Amino acid sequence: MGGVFLEQNEGNTVKLPPSITFAETPDSIPIVTINQILPSGSGVVTGSGPAQVTSSLTSITETPLIVGNNTRSVNITVRAANTNAALMWLQYFNNSAAQAGFSPSIYTSRAVGVDSFIFIRPDPKIYGVRLSMNQVNVNMAIQSAAPSVAG
């Protein structure tokens, strides 16, 4: 999902957030945005030595959904590579929900083994969540990063 997590002896932290974001409208409606990253491009590097990967954003396309509050709840579950990664996802979900201003009463989050999830449901009787999705096209290239030799 595009996130970069740093795992060290002192603990784990999110270095680059995943492509899932939370926000809240002025009238306390939770907004969940999921960006689908679609990489394209190619490159070949032979031999040994450093390589450089570059990327450029080519387009962002909103995936059509019903405008406004369009779902009663959102459940995002991530199956991570290991329990430490699952705990990092849980930390990301909790920090992002808190930063968005979500009341703890509208969401539940947990890590169980290698799975982490957040379940957002402000009021089960109404469509009280605004879910949106975007397709993000990124062109990527790989090339040798060897220093140039002056003559």
Image (spheres, rainbow, N blue to C red):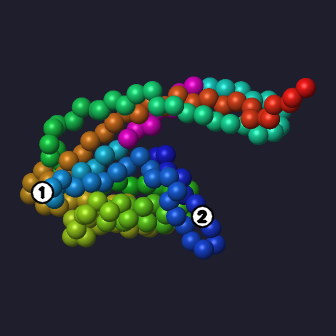
59 is within the stretch colored magenta: no
Q: Where is residue 53 in the image (x, y as percent from the top left)?
A: 64, 36
Which amino acid type is shown beneath numbered disc 2? Glu
- Going 34% across and 51% down the picture, which residue do you hit? 21
User: Which amino acid lies under the numbered mark 1 shown in the image of this protein?
Assistant: Asp
x, y percentage for residue 114? Answer: 50, 62
Magenta region: 35-41
Question: What is the residue that sits farthest to the left in this orientation?
Answer: 125
* Mark 2 Cα shell of 10 Å, populated few (<14), some (14-19), many (≥20): some
Compared with residue 6, is residue 1 higher up or lower down, i.e. above or below? above
**Which quarter of the picture shows residue 27?**
bottom left
The single residue placed furthest to the front in the displayed view is 151
Instruction: Say whether residue 54 is left or right of residue 17.
Output: right
Q: Position of residue 25 (x, y in %)?
A: 18, 53
Q: Is mark 1 on a helix, strand or loop?
A: loop
Side (left or right) of 90 relative to 127: right
* Mark sitting on residue 121: none
| Mark 1 neighbour density, 10 Å: few (under 14) some (14–19) many (20 or more) | few
Which structural element holds mark 2?
A: strand
Location of the C terminus by quadrant is top right
Residue 40 painted magenta:
yes
Q: Tell me if I can see residue 116 in this picture.
A: no
Question: Residue 138 versus residue 149: which sits nearer the camera?
Answer: 149
CA–CA distance in space, label 2 to label 1: 37 Å
41 on left or right of 131: right
Q: Going 38% across and 41% down the picture, which residue do you hit?
A: 35
* Residue 54 visible in the shown view: yes
Pointer 2 residue: 7
The answer to whether mark 2 and mark 1 are in CB contact below 8 A is: no
Q: Mark 1 points at which residue?
A: 27
